[in-house]
Image: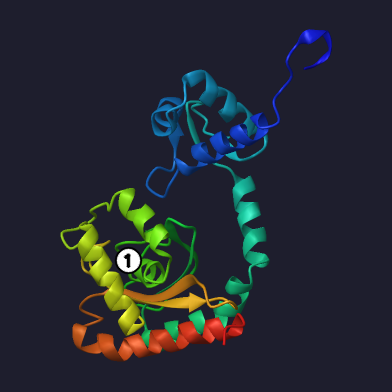
Amino acid sequence: MSQGGRTGPRPDDGLKSLVKVVRVLDAFSARNRTLSLTDLCAATGYPKSTVHRLLGAMRETGLLDQDLGRDRYRLGMKLFALGNTVLANMDLHREARPFVDALTRQGGQAVHLAVFDGRRAIVIHRADASPEKLLAAHTIEQAPAHCTGVGKAILAFQPEAVVRRIIDAGLTRYTETTITDPAALLSALATVRAAGYATDEGEHQPGLRCIGAPIRDRSGQVIAGISLTGPAWRLPLAEVDGLSKVVIHHANGISTALGHR
């Protein structure tokens, strides 16, 4: 209690505000690049007054930018600067670069390096040697764990509670081949564990095939994955077995560079 009998801010008020800020940031994505106040209220479930207050503070700190029309918001450059700092200090990003480049040359397709945030595979590095350059840089910045090669390669080696949490959140359908049945996903993940690699048969984007393999840290925990992705006609099924060995080889090389034995 403050002087004069007035109640001051509780110790957990700051934490609650931080949670709200993160929830606002999570509303943005590669598909939802700009959002209005109304959009953000709908996405977060917070009242208009709360969101308006958060937006003002986030704009002042550079976490959000407001467009010239003054009615829509986008992620700010402060986040870009912080992201670059994270990458600069991330052993995975530094150690994996030569392996990503080597796999790109050998596979002749797009290569993605992604880390697991507990829900999705977040792409932190990308290279594309394919002539078509079909995969725009933003297409799988946040790869769903249940329907991409790199996502399933990571998810298959997570604790049961993590897998169950993702299933309970809902298995979004992206294409006709997306796995949306929990039992089917659990079966697919068991196959990944047995084979040591995962495939994506147009499950996230039609016509694309992906081969992903897990990356382990010093303790042996799977924290990331690397994948080779291209049009199905350039990555025929007959070549998946051979290419999977190449992807696994580079994933193991990264794991070794991170200290895994």
The residue nearer to you, when weighing 126 against 185, is 185
SS for dot 1: loop
- The tally of labels here is 1
Task: Please state the horizontal and vertical placement of residue 156, each as a whole percent of the image.
Answer: 36, 70
Quadrant of the rendering where the N terminus is positioned: top right
Tell me: 23 left or right of 198: right
Residue occupying the point 51% across, 77% down: 216
Q: Is residue 196 above or below residue 23?
A: below
Task: Please state the horizontal and vertical placement of residue 234, each as a whole percent of the image.
Answer: 25, 80
Task: Please state the horizontal and vertical placement of residue 90, each as a whole percent of the image.
Answer: 63, 68
Tell me: 168 left or right of 51: left
The residue nearer to you, when weighing 28 against 10, is 10
Q: Is residue 98 above or below residue 118?
A: below
Residue occupying the point 80% across, 16% down: 2
Residue occupying the point 20% across, 78% down: 233
Residue 227 position by quadrant: bottom left
The residue beneath circle 1 is 148
